[in-house]
Image: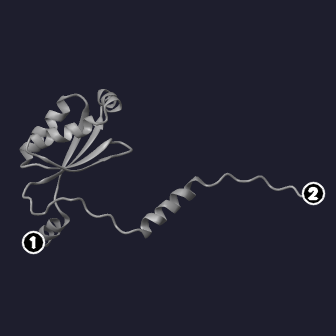
Amino acid sequence: MTIEPPQRPSNPWTRFEEGVESAIDTEPLPVGDIDDDDDMPVYMMLSRLTERGRDRVKDHPERILEVNHEVEQRGCAVVAQYALMGQYDFVTIIRAPSNEAMHRLAIELGARGTIETQTYPAIPTEEFINAMKQPD
């Protein structure tokens, strides 16, 4: 009679590592559809839902798209938006005519009491590289 040793629980990182390896083997994801011909600056808005915001999204998730439409009615353009896991709930890439317009938009959205935002200006990598090559 042979007694088998007890099975060790599987390593939870194995599936993660396999996922990383398969992600590395795939084609790179395309950069967002930010039209380089558009003169409007690009901003990255990180948003965190408040308790009131979580209740609203839970009951009416389509409200997210309605807000995106409202953003566009204010002269800005939602280029891309992703739901996140972690410290922030969403990242939204927005084109706005100016810093002032983006400030106004962020304040208006935050004043509703459903989200808290952090907004960062973003420039295309190619523009960044060109700026770094400029002499002092």
Residue 94, horizontal then vertical, whole percent: 17, 49
- The CA span between labels 1 and 2 is 79 Å
Lateral position of residue 104 relative to residue 50, left or right: left
Q: Say what secondary structure mark 2 lies in.
A: loop
Please give the name of the residue rendered at 29% of the width and 30% of the height, measured from the top-left corner: 53
Quarter of the image holding residue 105? top left
Dot 2, how many residues are within 10 Å of its Cα: few (below 14), some (14-19), or many (20+)?
few
Give the quadrant of the N terminus. Answer: bottom right
Q: Is residue 100 above or below residue 17?
A: above
Dot 1, how many residues are within 10 Å of its Cα: few (below 14), some (14-19), or many (20+)?
few
Mark 1 and mark 2 lie on one chain; the one further toward the N terminus is 2
Please give the name of the residue rendered at 18% of the width and 35% of the height, measured from the top-left corner: 109
Residue 16, horizontal then vertical, whole percent: 51, 57
Tell me the kind of residue under disc 2: Met
Q: Nearer the viewer, mark 1 or mark 2?
A: 2
Scheme of image coloration? one colour
Q: How many marks?
A: 2
Q: 84 or 117: nearer the eye? A: 84
Lateral position of residue 69 relative to residue 63, left or right: left
Give the quadrant of the C terminus. Answer: bottom left
Q: Is residue 60 above or below residue 24?
A: above
| Circle number at residue 1 | 2
Please give the name of the residue rendered at 38% of the width and 44% of the height, measured from the top-left corner: 86
Q: Which residue is mark 1?
A: 134
Residue 17, horizontal then vertical, whole percent: 52, 61
Residue 3, horizontal then vertical, whole percent: 87, 55
